[in-house]
Amino acid sequence: MKNYLIVGGSGFLGSHIITELLEKQADVSVSDIIGPHYANRIGDKMESINYIWKSAEDLNEKDIADIDCILFLAAQADVPLVLSSPKYSFHTNTAGLINVLELIRAKKNTQLIFMSSKNVYGKAENSSVSEDDVLRPTDPYGAGKAAADLMCQSYAESFGLPITVIRSSGLFGPNSRLQQVIPIFIKQALEDASITIEGDGSQSTDFNYVQNLVDAMISMAESEVNGVYNIAYGKDYSIKDIADLVIKQTDSKSEIKNLPWRSGEKGMRLSLSIEKARRDFGYTPKISFEEGIEKTVNWMKNL
């Protein structure tokens, strides 16, 4: 079993990956800027991992000396903060990665799996985008992720490094941030409050239940597959359909309240083609969208 370092591992996705890797009896280190006493999502795992209270920019050769695979999850992904502090967000989402790329360039034999985002595609010309589509980010977050995405590809090509880039759809599931659309809808439904939709709800995008992404990342690490891969459900879901499903699964009396359109969202539709991942390492999302919503509802009921 490999030795793993999860950069930015104290968050939503990291908490699920750590659980899975520990069940496989892997050696797990985590690097994060969150103090160990405040890393609540992984607090019950602290005795089983090596926690490095350090930013990605400050990692050094000793930190990765025995590491076989680095999962790079660290990012400033709060979109309102990205819009108010684009310089800070761009620096945060690129500088630490470049430091890690330099470390693995010197070490040569450490695999890197980097979490990119569907936001690198922006307003794609096709409703279903493949890894070969042009990157057209429309906001500073997407631009920062695209820069990091391309930096990974350039290091892989220039220095022959084992690097994989994951362009992930929006994630949901237990431990997720409550300020995202699906948890917001679930909270409103559980309270029988109005479910607020900006626009008529016809805008749609791809999502994924977190465990499906975890399964994909571990498959990539174990098979040592390299390259760029979309990981998602491979189909889009409209905001209206999500709201209706949440109301049904919570048996809620909530009604939908439509607000004015958010800028740029009218007519938006995006799904990620997952054919390349399916072909290269057998990826398929095992937990359906409906089952994922049910699991998330059950988690939120117990908060």
Image: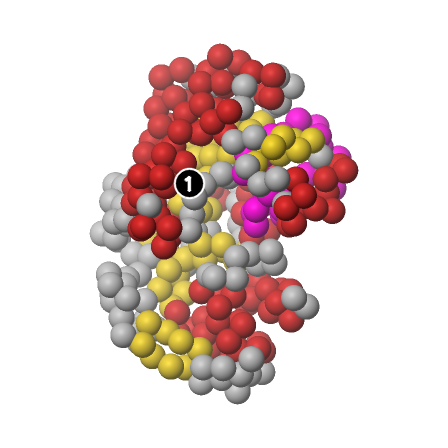
Residue 172 pos. (x, y %) = 52, 58
Residue 241 pos. (x, y %) = 42, 73
- The three-letter amino acid code for the residue at tag 1 is Ser
Tell me the quarter of the picture where residue 146 sits.
Answer: top left
Q: What residue is shown at x 44% (from left), y 85% (from top)?
A: 255
In magenta segment, residue 10? yes
Q: Please give left or right for residue 117 compared with residue 64 in the image.
A: left
Residue 138 pos. (x, y %) = 25, 49
Q: Please give left or right for residue 95 compared with residue 11 in the image.
A: left
Image quadrant containing the N terminus: top right
In the image, residue 193 above or below residue 186: below
Q: What residue is shown at x 47% (from left), y 34% (from top)?
A: 114
In this rendering, does residue 68 appear at all? yes
* Magenta segment: 1-27
In this rendering, does residue 291 appear at all? no
Q: Please give left or right for residue 203 compared with residue 187 in the image.
A: left
Residue 207 pos. (x, y %) = 45, 57
Judging depth in this view, the residue of 5 and 43 nearest the camera is 43
Q: Residue furthest top?
A: 106
The residue at which mark 1 appears reads as 116
Q: Please give left or right for residue 57 compared with residue 299 in the image.
A: left
In magenta segment, residue 99? no
Q: Residue furthest bottom?
A: 253
Judging depth in this view, the residue of 144 and 270 nearest the camera is 144
